[in-house]
Amino acid sequence: MCLVFGSSMKIAVIGCGYVGLVTGACLANLGNDVICVDIDDEKVSALRRGVIPFFEPGLRDMVEMNLAQKRLMFTTDSEIAIKNSDVVFIAVGTPSSSDGSADMSSVFAVAEQIARFMGSYKVIIVKSTVPVGTCHKVRELIREKLRKAVEFDVVSNPEFLREGEAVNDFMIPDRVVIGVDNGKAKDVMLSIYRPIERTGRPIMITDVKSSELIKYASNAMLATRISFMNEISYLCEKVGADVKTIAKGIGLDSRIGPRFLQAGIGYGGSCFPKDVRALIQLMKAHGCNSRLLESVDGINELQKSSVIQKVQRLVPDLKGRKVTVWGLSFKPKTDDMREAPSIVIIRELQKLGAEVYAFDPVSERNARQVLNGVHYADTPLGALEGASCLVVVTEWDLFRELDKGRMKQLMAEPNVVDGRNIYEPEEMRSLGFNYAGIGRG
Protein backbone atom coordinates (compact mmCIF):
# COMPACT_ATOMS: atom_id res chain seq x y z
CA MET A 1 0.00 0.00 0.00
CA CYS A 2 1.38 3.38 -0.98
CA LEU A 3 0.87 6.43 1.19
CA VAL A 4 0.11 9.61 -0.72
CA PHE A 5 0.78 12.59 1.54
CA GLY A 6 -1.74 15.41 1.34
CA SER A 7 -4.58 13.13 0.20
CA SER A 8 -7.17 11.28 2.25
CA MET A 9 -5.89 8.22 4.06
CA LYS A 10 -7.25 4.84 4.98
CA ILE A 11 -7.30 4.79 8.77
CA ALA A 12 -8.09 2.09 11.31
CA VAL A 13 -9.04 3.07 14.85
CA ILE A 14 -8.90 0.17 17.30
CA GLY A 15 -11.27 0.83 20.19
CA CYS A 16 -14.71 2.45 20.02
CA GLY A 17 -14.70 3.95 23.49
CA TYR A 18 -14.77 7.65 24.14
CA VAL A 19 -11.40 8.53 22.60
CA GLY A 20 -11.58 6.05 19.72
CA LEU A 21 -15.07 6.98 18.59
CA VAL A 22 -14.46 10.73 18.71
CA THR A 23 -11.12 10.30 16.94
CA GLY A 24 -12.58 8.06 14.24
CA ALA A 25 -15.57 10.30 13.55
CA CYS A 26 -13.48 13.45 13.38
CA LEU A 27 -10.87 11.87 11.10
CA ALA A 28 -13.67 10.74 8.79
CA ASN A 29 -15.05 14.26 8.86
CA LEU A 30 -11.68 15.47 7.58
CA GLY A 31 -12.18 13.33 4.46
CA ASN A 32 -10.39 10.13 5.43
CA ASP A 33 -11.77 6.60 5.07
CA VAL A 34 -12.01 5.33 8.62
CA ILE A 35 -12.72 1.85 9.96
CA CYS A 36 -13.41 1.72 13.71
CA VAL A 37 -12.95 -1.62 15.45
CA ASP A 38 -14.39 -2.89 18.71
CA ILE A 39 -14.75 -6.36 20.23
CA ASP A 40 -18.30 -5.62 21.47
CA ASP A 41 -20.75 -6.94 18.84
CA GLU A 42 -23.70 -5.11 20.37
CA LYS A 43 -21.86 -1.78 20.44
CA VAL A 44 -20.70 -2.15 16.83
CA SER A 45 -24.21 -3.05 15.68
CA ALA A 46 -25.59 0.04 17.41
CA LEU A 47 -22.89 2.29 15.98
CA ARG A 48 -23.70 1.10 12.47
CA ARG A 49 -27.19 2.49 13.08
CA GLY A 50 -25.76 5.76 14.36
CA VAL A 51 -26.53 4.99 18.03
CA ILE A 52 -23.83 6.50 20.25
CA PRO A 53 -23.08 4.64 23.51
CA PHE A 54 -22.45 7.80 25.54
CA PHE A 55 -23.57 11.42 25.59
CA GLU A 56 -21.29 13.82 23.75
CA PRO A 57 -22.65 16.98 22.09
CA GLY A 58 -22.30 16.99 18.29
CA LEU A 59 -20.91 13.48 17.99
CA ARG A 60 -24.05 11.70 16.85
CA ASP A 61 -24.60 14.11 13.97
CA MET A 62 -20.99 13.69 12.86
CA VAL A 63 -21.21 9.90 13.00
CA GLU A 64 -24.51 9.82 11.11
CA MET A 65 -23.23 12.15 8.38
CA ASN A 66 -20.02 10.20 7.78
CA LEU A 67 -21.82 6.86 7.87
CA ALA A 68 -24.17 8.17 5.18
CA GLN A 69 -21.22 9.38 3.09
CA LYS A 70 -19.48 6.00 3.58
CA ARG A 71 -16.32 7.51 5.02
CA LEU A 72 -16.92 5.83 8.38
CA MET A 73 -17.63 2.20 9.13
CA PHE A 74 -17.65 -0.04 12.19
CA THR A 75 -16.56 -3.65 12.50
CA THR A 76 -15.46 -6.33 14.96
CA ASP A 77 -13.00 -7.68 12.39
CA SER A 78 -9.60 -6.24 13.21
CA GLU A 79 -7.98 -8.18 10.38
CA ILE A 80 -9.99 -6.34 7.72
CA ALA A 81 -9.32 -2.99 9.38
CA ILE A 82 -5.57 -3.47 9.77
CA LYS A 83 -4.95 -4.95 6.33
CA ASN A 84 -6.92 -2.16 4.62
CA SER A 85 -5.34 0.79 6.39
CA ASP A 86 -2.40 3.14 5.95
CA VAL A 87 -2.29 4.03 9.63
CA VAL A 88 -3.63 2.34 12.75
CA PHE A 89 -4.66 4.28 15.85
CA ILE A 90 -4.57 2.36 19.13
CA ALA A 91 -7.34 3.91 21.24
CA VAL A 92 -8.20 1.29 23.83
CA GLY A 93 -8.61 1.88 27.56
CA THR A 94 -5.79 1.92 30.08
CA PRO A 95 -7.70 1.66 33.38
CA SER A 96 -6.09 1.78 36.79
CA SER A 97 -4.63 -1.42 38.19
CA SER A 98 -5.04 -2.17 41.89
CA ASP A 99 -1.85 -0.24 42.70
CA GLY A 100 -2.87 2.79 40.60
CA SER A 101 -0.59 2.05 37.66
CA ALA A 102 -2.03 1.94 34.14
CA ASP A 103 -3.26 -1.47 32.96
CA MET A 104 -1.63 -1.87 29.55
CA SER A 105 -3.03 -5.28 28.65
CA SER A 106 -5.46 -3.97 26.01
CA VAL A 107 -2.77 -1.86 24.31
CA PHE A 108 -0.41 -4.83 24.06
CA ALA A 109 -3.21 -7.10 22.85
CA VAL A 110 -3.88 -4.68 19.99
CA ALA A 111 -0.15 -4.59 19.20
CA GLU A 112 -0.20 -8.37 18.82
CA GLN A 113 -3.19 -8.13 16.48
CA ILE A 114 -1.39 -5.57 14.34
CA ALA A 115 1.65 -7.84 14.10
CA ARG A 116 -0.57 -10.77 13.09
CA PHE A 117 -2.38 -8.98 10.27
CA MET A 118 0.04 -6.31 9.03
CA GLY A 119 1.30 -7.04 5.53
CA SER A 120 2.65 -3.68 4.42
CA TYR A 121 4.12 -0.48 5.86
CA LYS A 122 1.95 1.09 8.57
CA VAL A 123 2.24 3.98 10.95
CA ILE A 124 0.96 2.75 14.30
CA ILE A 125 -0.27 5.62 16.45
CA VAL A 126 -0.68 5.19 20.20
CA LYS A 127 -3.60 7.44 21.11
CA SER A 128 -4.32 5.77 24.44
CA THR A 129 -2.94 7.44 27.57
CA VAL A 130 0.15 5.39 28.37
CA PRO A 131 3.26 5.54 30.56
CA VAL A 132 6.61 6.63 29.18
CA GLY A 133 8.24 3.80 27.27
CA THR A 134 5.00 2.23 26.01
CA CYS A 135 5.63 3.06 22.34
CA HIS A 136 9.02 1.36 22.62
CA LYS A 137 7.37 -1.73 24.13
CA VAL A 138 4.70 -1.73 21.40
CA ARG A 139 7.43 -1.55 18.74
CA GLU A 140 9.38 -4.42 20.29
CA LEU A 141 6.26 -6.55 20.72
CA ILE A 142 5.23 -6.09 17.09
CA ARG A 143 8.74 -6.94 15.90
CA GLU A 144 8.69 -10.07 18.04
CA LYS A 145 5.28 -11.21 16.78
CA LEU A 146 5.62 -10.32 13.07
CA ARG A 147 5.36 -13.36 10.79
CA LYS A 148 7.44 -11.72 8.05
CA ALA A 149 9.67 -8.68 7.68
CA VAL A 150 7.45 -5.61 7.35
CA GLU A 151 8.48 -2.01 7.82
CA PHE A 152 6.47 0.04 10.32
CA ASP A 153 6.73 3.02 12.67
CA VAL A 154 5.23 3.62 16.09
CA VAL A 155 4.16 7.17 16.96
CA SER A 156 2.90 8.79 20.17
CA ASN A 157 -0.12 11.06 19.68
CA PRO A 158 -1.81 11.75 23.05
CA GLU A 159 -5.40 12.96 23.17
CA PHE A 160 -6.56 16.12 24.93
CA LEU A 161 -10.33 15.69 24.63
CA ARG A 162 -12.58 17.20 27.28
CA GLU A 163 -15.81 15.33 27.80
CA GLY A 164 -18.64 17.56 26.66
CA GLU A 165 -16.30 19.46 24.31
CA ALA A 166 -14.55 16.59 22.55
CA VAL A 167 -15.59 17.28 18.96
CA ASN A 168 -14.49 20.91 19.20
CA ASP A 169 -11.31 19.90 20.99
CA PHE A 170 -10.37 17.55 18.15
CA MET A 171 -11.31 19.87 15.31
CA ILE A 172 -9.99 23.09 16.91
CA PRO A 173 -7.24 21.87 19.27
CA ASP A 174 -5.03 23.98 21.50
CA ARG A 175 -2.18 21.89 20.14
CA VAL A 176 -1.52 18.55 18.49
CA VAL A 177 1.36 16.67 20.08
CA ILE A 178 3.20 14.12 17.95
CA GLY A 179 6.13 12.05 19.16
CA VAL A 180 8.12 10.57 16.28
CA ASP A 181 11.60 9.24 15.71
CA ASN A 182 11.94 9.53 11.90
CA GLY A 183 10.95 11.75 9.01
CA LYS A 184 8.70 9.28 7.20
CA ALA A 185 6.35 8.89 10.16
CA LYS A 186 6.46 12.63 10.76
CA ASP A 187 5.28 13.30 7.19
CA VAL A 188 2.38 10.90 7.61
CA MET A 189 1.29 12.53 10.85
CA LEU A 190 1.53 16.04 9.41
CA SER A 191 -0.58 14.93 6.47
CA ILE A 192 -3.29 13.77 8.89
CA TYR A 193 -3.33 16.85 11.08
CA ARG A 194 -2.47 19.78 8.80
CA PRO A 195 -6.17 20.40 7.99
CA ILE A 196 -6.79 21.43 11.61
CA GLU A 197 -3.58 23.36 12.27
CA ARG A 198 -4.24 27.03 13.04
CA THR A 199 -2.10 30.06 13.86
CA GLY A 200 -1.29 29.94 17.56
CA ARG A 201 -2.53 26.33 17.76
CA PRO A 202 0.54 24.42 16.62
CA ILE A 203 1.37 20.89 15.65
CA MET A 204 4.12 20.16 18.17
CA ILE A 205 6.70 17.58 17.08
CA THR A 206 8.64 15.98 19.92
CA ASP A 207 10.58 12.85 20.71
CA VAL A 208 8.39 9.88 21.58
CA LYS A 209 9.06 9.78 25.34
CA SER A 210 8.36 13.49 25.81
CA SER A 211 5.09 13.12 23.93
CA GLU A 212 4.02 10.23 26.13
CA LEU A 213 4.72 12.23 29.29
CA ILE A 214 3.04 15.46 28.13
CA LYS A 215 -0.43 13.92 28.54
CA TYR A 216 0.15 12.76 32.12
CA ALA A 217 1.87 16.00 33.09
CA SER A 218 -0.97 18.10 31.62
CA ASN A 219 -3.68 16.28 33.53
CA ALA A 220 -1.64 16.26 36.73
CA MET A 221 -1.14 20.02 36.50
CA LEU A 222 -4.85 20.68 36.02
CA ALA A 223 -5.72 18.33 38.88
CA THR A 224 -3.16 20.11 41.07
CA ARG A 225 -4.81 23.49 40.43
CA ILE A 226 -8.19 22.06 41.46
CA SER A 227 -6.85 20.46 44.64
CA PHE A 228 -4.93 23.62 45.49
CA MET A 229 -8.11 25.71 45.39
CA ASN A 230 -10.02 23.09 47.35
CA GLU A 231 -7.39 23.23 50.07
CA ILE A 232 -7.54 27.05 50.09
CA SER A 233 -11.32 26.76 50.46
CA TYR A 234 -10.86 25.23 53.92
CA LEU A 235 -8.99 28.32 55.09
CA CYS A 236 -11.58 30.61 53.48
CA GLU A 237 -14.31 29.00 55.56
CA LYS A 238 -12.28 29.43 58.76
CA VAL A 239 -11.44 33.09 58.24
CA GLY A 240 -14.56 34.28 56.42
CA ALA A 241 -13.04 34.83 52.97
CA ASP A 242 -14.68 33.96 49.63
CA VAL A 243 -12.84 31.39 47.52
CA LYS A 244 -14.48 32.63 44.30
CA THR A 245 -13.03 36.07 44.92
CA ILE A 246 -9.67 34.51 45.72
CA ALA A 247 -9.79 32.55 42.46
CA LYS A 248 -10.59 35.68 40.47
CA GLY A 249 -7.73 37.59 42.09
CA ILE A 250 -5.29 34.76 41.40
CA GLY A 251 -6.53 34.20 37.86
CA LEU A 252 -6.01 37.82 36.85
CA ASP A 253 -2.28 37.23 37.22
CA SER A 254 -1.15 36.56 33.64
CA ARG A 255 1.37 34.05 34.91
CA ILE A 256 -1.44 31.92 36.36
CA GLY A 257 -4.65 32.50 34.39
CA PRO A 258 -8.22 31.76 35.48
CA ARG A 259 -8.85 28.18 34.34
CA PHE A 260 -9.22 25.23 36.73
CA LEU A 261 -9.26 27.44 39.82
CA GLN A 262 -12.83 26.61 40.84
CA ALA A 263 -13.19 25.11 44.29
CA GLY A 264 -15.82 22.41 44.53
CA ILE A 265 -16.33 18.81 45.54
CA GLY A 266 -13.39 17.36 43.68
CA TYR A 267 -12.56 16.17 40.20
CA GLY A 268 -13.70 12.88 38.71
CA GLY A 269 -14.07 11.25 35.32
CA SER A 270 -11.94 8.87 33.34
CA CYS A 271 -8.77 11.00 33.16
CA PHE A 272 -7.68 13.06 36.14
CA PRO A 273 -7.98 10.44 38.92
CA LYS A 274 -6.53 7.63 36.81
CA ASP A 275 -3.73 9.69 35.29
CA VAL A 276 -2.61 11.29 38.56
CA ARG A 277 -2.37 7.86 40.18
CA ALA A 278 -0.60 6.38 37.18
CA LEU A 279 1.93 9.21 37.22
CA ILE A 280 2.52 8.65 40.94
CA GLN A 281 3.30 4.98 40.27
CA LEU A 282 5.46 5.85 37.27
CA MET A 283 7.52 8.27 39.37
CA LYS A 284 7.91 5.72 42.13
CA ALA A 285 9.00 3.08 39.61
CA HIS A 286 11.79 5.41 38.51
CA GLY A 287 12.83 6.36 42.04
CA CYS A 288 11.29 9.85 41.94
CA ASN A 289 9.56 11.72 44.75
CA SER A 290 5.77 11.90 44.28
CA ARG A 291 4.65 13.67 47.48
CA LEU A 292 2.99 16.58 45.66
CA LEU A 293 0.85 14.35 43.46
CA GLU A 294 0.00 12.05 46.36
CA SER A 295 -1.32 15.12 48.18
CA VAL A 296 -3.28 16.21 45.11
CA ASP A 297 -4.97 12.81 44.99
CA GLY A 298 -5.56 12.71 48.74
CA ILE A 299 -7.11 16.20 48.87
CA ASN A 300 -9.43 15.23 46.04
CA GLU A 301 -10.68 12.14 47.83
CA LEU A 302 -11.28 14.09 51.05
CA GLN A 303 -13.12 16.82 49.17
CA LYS A 304 -15.78 14.43 47.91
CA SER A 305 -16.85 13.53 51.45
CA SER A 306 -16.43 17.04 52.90
CA VAL A 307 -19.91 17.84 51.60
CA ILE A 308 -21.37 15.35 54.07
CA GLN A 309 -20.10 17.41 57.01
CA LYS A 310 -21.88 20.46 55.62
CA VAL A 311 -25.11 18.50 55.22
CA GLN A 312 -24.87 17.21 58.78
CA ARG A 313 -24.35 20.72 60.16
CA LEU A 314 -27.65 21.73 58.56
CA VAL A 315 -29.47 18.45 59.22
CA PRO A 316 -27.81 16.74 62.21
CA ASP A 317 -30.08 13.65 62.10
CA LEU A 318 -30.41 12.35 58.54
CA LYS A 319 -32.17 9.12 59.37
CA GLY A 320 -35.35 8.95 57.31
CA ARG A 321 -34.85 12.46 55.91
CA LYS A 322 -35.13 13.14 52.21
CA VAL A 323 -31.99 14.59 50.65
CA THR A 324 -32.07 15.75 47.04
CA VAL A 325 -28.99 15.48 44.85
CA TRP A 326 -28.86 17.59 41.70
CA GLY A 327 -26.36 16.26 39.19
CA LEU A 328 -24.82 12.80 39.00
CA SER A 329 -22.19 12.86 36.23
CA PHE A 330 -18.72 13.99 37.20
CA LYS A 331 -19.20 17.21 35.24
CA PRO A 332 -21.79 18.84 32.94
CA LYS A 333 -22.27 17.94 29.25
CA THR A 334 -21.51 14.27 29.82
CA ASP A 335 -23.20 11.17 31.20
CA ASP A 336 -19.91 9.78 32.49
CA MET A 337 -20.16 8.41 36.03
CA ARG A 338 -16.56 7.23 36.33
CA GLU A 339 -15.05 8.51 39.60
CA ALA A 340 -18.04 10.86 39.94
CA PRO A 341 -18.15 12.61 43.34
CA SER A 342 -21.90 11.90 43.42
CA ILE A 343 -21.18 8.22 44.02
CA VAL A 344 -19.23 8.86 47.22
CA ILE A 345 -21.68 11.53 48.42
CA ILE A 346 -24.82 9.46 47.83
CA ARG A 347 -23.41 6.32 49.42
CA GLU A 348 -22.35 8.24 52.52
CA LEU A 349 -25.76 9.91 52.78
CA GLN A 350 -27.40 6.50 52.55
CA LYS A 351 -25.12 5.12 55.28
CA LEU A 352 -26.40 7.94 57.52
CA GLY A 353 -29.97 6.89 56.85
CA ALA A 354 -31.02 9.51 54.31
CA GLU A 355 -33.50 8.80 51.52
CA VAL A 356 -31.77 10.09 48.41
CA TYR A 357 -33.72 11.54 45.49
CA ALA A 358 -31.73 12.54 42.44
CA PHE A 359 -32.00 14.31 39.12
CA ASP A 360 -29.56 14.53 36.23
CA PRO A 361 -30.57 15.48 32.68
CA VAL A 362 -28.55 12.73 30.96
CA SER A 363 -26.85 10.42 33.50
CA GLU A 364 -29.68 8.45 35.10
CA ARG A 365 -29.14 5.31 33.01
CA ASN A 366 -25.45 5.12 33.90
CA ALA A 367 -26.09 6.08 37.52
CA ARG A 368 -28.48 3.15 37.95
CA GLN A 369 -25.61 0.81 37.12
CA VAL A 370 -23.42 2.03 40.02
CA LEU A 371 -25.89 3.28 42.64
CA ASN A 372 -28.55 1.36 44.55
CA GLY A 373 -31.56 2.60 46.48
CA VAL A 374 -31.73 6.02 44.80
CA HIS A 375 -35.07 7.51 43.75
CA TYR A 376 -34.91 9.30 40.40
CA ALA A 377 -37.09 12.22 39.36
CA ASP A 378 -38.00 13.51 35.91
CA THR A 379 -37.33 17.16 36.81
CA PRO A 380 -35.09 18.96 39.31
CA LEU A 381 -38.08 20.46 41.10
CA GLY A 382 -39.77 17.06 41.19
CA ALA A 383 -36.75 15.68 43.03
CA LEU A 384 -36.84 18.60 45.49
CA GLU A 385 -40.36 18.24 46.85
CA GLY A 386 -40.33 17.47 50.58
CA ALA A 387 -36.53 17.51 50.87
CA SER A 388 -34.75 18.44 54.06
CA CYS A 389 -31.62 19.35 52.13
CA LEU A 390 -30.53 19.97 48.54
CA VAL A 391 -27.00 19.06 47.50
CA VAL A 392 -25.78 20.51 44.20
CA VAL A 393 -23.20 18.08 42.87
CA THR A 394 -22.92 18.82 39.12
CA GLU A 395 -23.13 22.36 37.79
CA TRP A 396 -25.62 21.82 34.97
CA ASP A 397 -26.77 25.20 33.63
CA LEU A 398 -30.46 24.44 34.15
CA PHE A 399 -29.93 24.47 37.93
CA ARG A 400 -28.69 28.06 37.94
CA GLU A 401 -31.86 29.84 36.85
CA LEU A 402 -34.61 27.83 38.51
CA ASP A 403 -37.23 29.78 40.47
CA LYS A 404 -35.67 29.94 43.92
CA GLY A 405 -38.93 30.95 45.55
CA ARG A 406 -40.53 27.81 44.15
CA MET A 407 -37.55 25.76 45.32
CA LYS A 408 -38.05 26.98 48.89
CA GLN A 409 -41.78 26.31 48.81
CA LEU A 410 -41.25 22.73 47.73
CA MET A 411 -38.69 21.88 50.39
CA ALA A 412 -39.59 20.60 53.84
CA GLU A 413 -36.56 22.48 55.18
CA PRO A 414 -34.71 25.17 53.17
CA ASN A 415 -31.20 23.74 53.48
CA VAL A 416 -28.85 23.97 50.50
CA VAL A 417 -25.30 22.64 50.20
CA ASP A 418 -23.90 24.07 47.00
CA GLY A 419 -21.00 21.82 46.05
CA ARG A 420 -20.22 23.84 42.92
CA ASN A 421 -20.80 27.40 44.12
CA ILE A 422 -23.39 28.10 41.43
CA TYR A 423 -25.47 30.35 43.71
CA GLU A 424 -24.59 33.57 45.54
CA PRO A 425 -24.62 33.13 49.33
CA GLU A 426 -26.14 36.56 50.08
CA GLU A 427 -29.01 36.04 47.66
CA MET A 428 -29.79 32.56 48.95
CA ARG A 429 -29.72 33.65 52.58
CA SER A 430 -31.88 36.69 51.82
CA LEU A 431 -34.47 34.32 50.35
CA GLY A 432 -34.53 32.31 53.58
CA PHE A 433 -32.26 29.41 52.68
CA ASN A 434 -29.75 27.95 55.07
CA TYR A 435 -26.93 27.99 52.57
CA ALA A 436 -23.47 26.40 52.61
CA GLY A 437 -21.07 26.66 49.68
CA ILE A 438 -17.45 25.62 49.26
CA GLY A 439 -14.96 28.08 50.72
CA ARG A 440 -17.48 30.90 51.04
CA GLY A 441 -17.39 31.98 54.65
Image: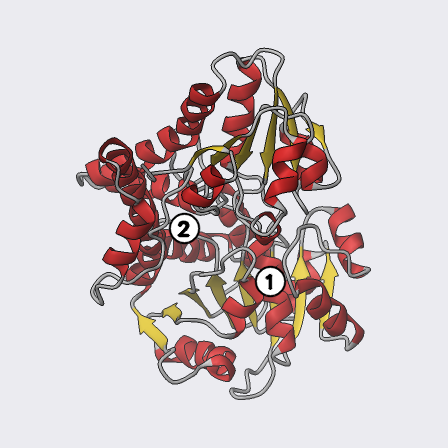
The answer to which image quadrant residue 338 occupies is top right
Viewer-nearest residue: 164 or 147 = 164
Q: Report, in whole angstroms, how far the alpha carbon at label 1 lies from the one at label 2.
A: 18 Å
**347 up-or-down from 178: above or below:** above
Q: Is residue 118 visible?
A: no
Name the element at disc 2.
loop
Disc 1 marks a residue whose amino acid type is Val
**236 up-or-down from 139: above or below:** above
Q: How many marks?
A: 2
Q: Which residue is mark 1?
A: 22
Q: Quadrant of the C terminus?
A: top left
The answer to which image quadrant residue 174 occupies is bottom left
Where in the figure is residue 278, as x and y percent of width and height?
36, 41
Disc 2 marks a residue whose amino acid type is Val
Q: With 322 as the anchor, is 237 left or right in this view? A: left
Badge 1 or badge 2: first in the primary sequence: 1
> Residue at (20%, 65%) from the top-left corner?
255
Where in the figure is residue 263, as x and y percent of width and height?
36, 44
Q: Which residue is mark 2?
A: 130
Q: Quadrant of the N terminus?
A: bottom right
Name the element at disc 1.
helix
**390 up-or-down from 108: above or below:** above
Viewer-nearest residue: 264 or 323 = 323
Q: How is the image coloured?
A: secondary structure
> Residue at (69%, 32%) from the top-left corner?
368
Where in the figure is residue 239, as x and y percent of width and height?
22, 34
> Residue at (48%, 47%) from the top-left corner?
422
